[in-house]
C-alpha cells in the first residue's frame, strides 16, 4: 500500500514576481527538453523561483504514486500560472527534478487551496539528500506564457502582458502542503 503524509511550511507568506518577457524555462520532467530528470540547480537559483528545502533525510525515502500540492495562492492580475517541481537535492548542492505539476488559474476559478496533481512517480531519495519544492509562474516553452490579462494564450499579445506578483501563503490558517505517496517496504 501507499501511505500519504503532509509537510506544512512554517512561513506565513512569500511573494513571487513573474516577468512574462523573461519566463522561467522548462527543463526536464514530462514537459521539458531534455525529458526526464536533469540538473536544475541554475533554475532554482533564479530570483523568480521560490524554493522550500527539507532537512537532510535520516533514512531513504521511497515515493510511489501521485504527489499532490495544495497551495493558497493569489495574484494581482486576473489570471496566473503556477509551476511546482519536486526535486532531490544532493549533498554537493546539485538539484535533480523528480516530478512536476502545472496549473493555469483563469478569472473566476481562483479557489483556494489550489490543488495541483504532479506526474506519478516511483523514486528512491537517498538518506542524507533533501527534498525541495520549487515554485514559479512559468515553465516556457512547455506551457504558453500567461499574459495575466485573462485572455487565452492564442488571443493575447506579448506587448499586452503584465508582470504578475503571486502571494503564496502557508502556515497558520492557510495550510499549504505537499502530500507525498510514501511507500514503505513493510507494506505489501
Image (tube, rainbow, N blue to C red):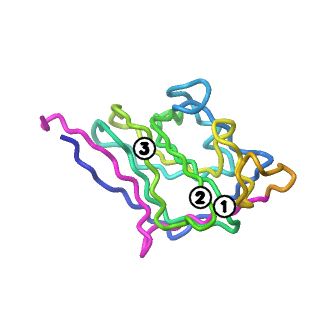
Number of residues whose C-alpha sits closer than 10 Å to that of mark 2, classed few (under 14), some (14–19) or many (20 or more): some
- In the image shown, does 93 or 111 lie closer to the viewer? 111
Residue 23: image location, x then y, percent: 72, 45
Residue 168 falls in which quadrant of the image?
bottom right
Is 124 left, or right, of 143 in this rendering? left
Number of residues whose C-alpha sits closer than 10 Å to that of mark 3, classed few (under 14), some (14–19) or many (20 or more): many
**Quadrant including the C terminus:** top left
Mark earlier in primary sequence (1, 3): 1
Residue 118 falls in which quadrant of the image?
top left
Q: Is residue 177 magenta?
A: yes
Residue at x 36% of width, y 37% of height = 128
Q: CA distance from mark 2 to mark 1?
A: 5 Å
Identify residue for label 1: 79
Mark earlier in primary sequence (3, 2): 2
Point out the stretch of residues depicted in magenta. Answer: 162-188
Callouts 1 and 3 close, C-beta under 8 Å: no
Q: In the image, which disc is placed on residue 131?
A: 3
- In the image shown, does 40 or 151 lie closer to the viewer? 151
Residue at x 36% of width, y 34% of height = 125
Asked which secondary structure carries label 3, the reply is strand
Amino acid at each position: 500500500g501507499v501511505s500519504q503524509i503532509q509537510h506544512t511550511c512554517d512561513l506565513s507568506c512569500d511573494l513571487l514576481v513573474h516577468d512574462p518577457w523573461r519566463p522561467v524555462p522548462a527543463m526536464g520532467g514530462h514537459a521539458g527538453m531534455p525529458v526526464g530528470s536533469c540538473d536544475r540547480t541554475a533554475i532554482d537559483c533564479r530570483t523568480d523561483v521560490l524554493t522550500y528545502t527539507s532537512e537532510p533525510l535520516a533514512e531513504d525515502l521511497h515515493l510511489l504514486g501521485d504527489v499532490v500540492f495544495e497551495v493558497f495562492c493569489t495574484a494581482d492580475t486576473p489570471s496566473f500560472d503556477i509551476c511546482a517541481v519536486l526535486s532531490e537535492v544532493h549533498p554537493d548542492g546539485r538539484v535533480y527534478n523528480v516530478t512536476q505539476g502545472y496549473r493555469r488559474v483563469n478569472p473566476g476559478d481562483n479557489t483556494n487551496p489550489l490543488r495541483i496533481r504532479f506526474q506519478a512517480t516511483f523514486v528512491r531519495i537517498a538518506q542524507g539528500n533533501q527534498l525541495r519544492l520549487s515554485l514559479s509562474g512559468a515553465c516556457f516553452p512547455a506551457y504558453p506564457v500567461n499574459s495575466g490579462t485573462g485572455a487565452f494564450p492564442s488571443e493575447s499579445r506579448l506587448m499586452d502582458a503584465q508582470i504578475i506578483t503571486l502571494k503564496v501563503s502557508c502556515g497558520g490558517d492557510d495550510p499549504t502542503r505537499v502530500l507525498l505517496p510514501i511507500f514503505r517496504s513493510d507494506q505489501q
